[in-house]
Image (cartoon, rainbow, N blue to C red):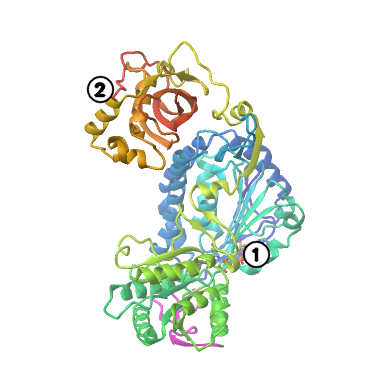
Amino acid sequence: MSTLESYVAGRWQAGTDDGEPVLDAVTGEEITRVSSHGIDFAAVVAHAREVGGPAVARLTFHERATLLKELALHLGGAKDEFYALSLRTGATRRDSAVDIDGGIGTLFSYASKGKRELPDDTVVLDGALEPLGKGGTFVGQHLYTSRPGVAVQINAFNFPVWGMLEKLAPAFLAGLPGIVKPGSQTAYLTAAVVRHIIASGILPEGSLQLVCGSAGTLLDELGEQDSVAFTGSAHTAEILRSHPSVLHRGVRLGVEADSLNCSILGPDVRPEDPELDLFFKGVVTEMTVKAGQKCTAIRRVLVPEAMADAVIGAISARLARITVGNPADDGVRMGALASLRQRDEVRKAIEALRTSADIVHGDPDHVEVVGADAERGAFLSPVLLRARPGAAEPHEVEPFGPVATVLTYGSVDEAVALAARGRGSLVASLVTHDPQVARDVTRGLAPWHGRLLLLDRDDAAESTGHGSPLPMLVHGGPGRAGGGEELGGVRGVLHHMQRTAVQGSPDMLTAVTGRWTTGSRRVVGSVHPFRKSLAELRVGDTIETATRTVTQDDIDHFAEFTGDTFYAHTDPAAAAANPFFGGIVAHGYLVVSLAAGLFVDPAPGPVLANFGVDNLRFLTPVHVGDTIRVALTVKQITPRTSADYGEVRWEADVTNQDGEQVAAYDVLTLVAKTGQNTTGKNTTGQDTTGA
Ligand code: NAP
């Protein structure tokens, strides 16, 4: 039997000893062996730093996002192979979808977010400019840059595909090369995916390496700019937290450890309510999907005392209908655990739970199995327990399998207190149709959880369920859950980057950030910037407009034309009594409209459309007789990679005759990249004016 190859320093390499056997979870046959013996970990890290890192860092966020999308499409074409291998991990087709399609979906989601929410640049500005001096010559700006480091991921066995891709996507977008160390038990599936990634040539060489087998001395090679994202047991997390590289060299360690998640049945739910069925469904699904080997699975089922018997009866009846067996068999709802060792671990955990809870459904030592040998495969019956009063173990012991314990509560406060005894969890769900219960429980639970699902008849049809981490929402939880945070959309990308406060003059900050900073030099040329294509425009290009004096007729006309006859524009006495206006004032939208009339250059040209304004503020009232003018400055230029136009953000600064700012906002336009002439045809002859 050959050992599974790792992909390190640009080549596939097998371990140099016999390695550890990895068995098929269903049949017990040996699939492969894993060993990282003989891998030069210093060379692996050097390859990531010297080859992969610079290649990824050279790309903009949009270019990285484009590669992630290509990768997602490419892997989608190889799904059949991954599904076939996934059966051997004990996963049913439904389980595999969570892992394989969930992983590929995460790549798509990050590709899209990278394009839409990050700039086509290599730095990200964080927050607004901070004025630091009265004269406006000294300002501060927070910005994120990519670290010249390596993102190591050490993953648990339960999600061999999603586990890798959900970490790879944000780290790659952040500009970091990755080294993946999968859980050995299912590393063959991770390796199959990595083979496709490497063979595709989509990612730059060195940006993804794979270590199958033990992590060896990998962590010894890491330093201040590197990070480790760990998913696994609290025990291993403890070992990693005390590693010298973490303790003494500032390696950033993110931990996603075990979690005693709960689902709470609200005190308002009556037997006839649809919420009760949703609750049962949620518990049974979470107990049986992936045979309960999910970090987000429901381990504690919290119900009002009076509902306990009914809940136990209904959940037991549903569990009795779950067919356990060979996941390749269509009728099977729950496959095997990942390994016989894992089954032993779960049996031990059930024994520990029995110290303070009684089994009310299932037998840990026996299960009817369809299409496989119950002893050679790692099969286990779903097991439901009921806690005795004052039970401690259900809040301490994590059975990483199809096991949950029912606990009862008297009041909402008690339910919150019981949930908190998990000492920090990834997720909790509350099934209630009562907004007050939702408010009280959510406010109590939130500090102890990374994610909360409020489930009722209104959101059930669209709900993604208790157990599904989503790319756009934070995954991670405080305390026992590890204190880590992954995903969460762009938050997950920024998490890998360094935030730095940069102080200096506005001109210096414009140079550093590539975005025009308020207070920087404006460039007023002889050509109106609306006549310049994206290729010709420069940050700082400015239109300084003529002036316009606002008349009573302007205000009356606008009020009548739009129907906005708010008293401040139409009723002199009432307007005079207003604490801010002291008399009739122009509508804010009139000011913005007049401003557009001042800065627009009307003829067809490179400016294709105005798609909105950001950060609009009306700062000083405009009275009849006031004279306004506008300075419109190119603030940011973002070419779109897959279009022949890009976005231009302009800063609009509207002032009155005394130099006071009356309105400030960003104008957002689409501008042709090149060759736009006054007929509205671009160089390809395409009409881009929308006419
Ligand atoms: P584990 O034994 O802690 O293993 C996790 C990973 O750590 C594996 O890749 C393992 O490699 C590696 N590892 C073990 N000892 C190590 C060491 N001394 N140095 C470096 N790496 C080491 O956990 P598991 O049994 O695979 O996974 C089950 C646990 O993971 C459960 O407790 C579950 O709750 C938790 N989990 C949490 C999340 C989450 O997002 N919070 C998700 C999934 C699972 P080998 O496989 O080669 O031993």
364 versus 203 height, above or below: below
Mark 1 surroundings within 10 Å by alpha-carbon count, few (fewer than 14), some (14 through 19), many (20 or more): many
Can residue 642 be seen? Answer: no
Residue 632 sits above or below residue 408 on the image = above
Find out if the beta carbon at label 1 lies less than 8 Å from the nearest ligand 1 atom.
yes
Instruction: Check the picture and name the quadrant holding the C terminus.
Output: top left
**Residue 54 spot, x, y in % from top left:** 63, 36
* Residue beneath the point at 39% across and 66% down: 454
Q: Is residue 479 left or right of residue 318?
A: right
Type of the residue with mark 2: Ala
- Where in the image, quadrant-wise, is ligand 1 located? bottom right
Q: For mark 1, give the secondary structure.
A: helix
Determine whether the residue tagged by mark 2 lies in a helix, strand or loop.
loop
Count of numbered tags: 2
Q: Position of residue 595 (x, y in %)?
A: 38, 25
Task: Look at the image and tell me in which quarter the N terminus lies.
Answer: bottom right
**Label 2 vs label 1: CA separation?**
61 Å
* Circle number at residue 237: 1
User: Between residues 139 and 646, which one lies in front from this camera angle?
Assistant: 139
Q: Which residue is mark 2?
A: 691
Other-residue count near label 2 (Cα within 10 Å), few / some / many at <14 / 14–19 / ≥20:
few
The residue segment tinted magenta is 356-383
Is residue 367 one of those drawn in magenta? yes
**Does residue 408 appear to the left or right of 460 in the view shown?**
right
Q: Residue at x 43, y 49 (%)?
A: 78
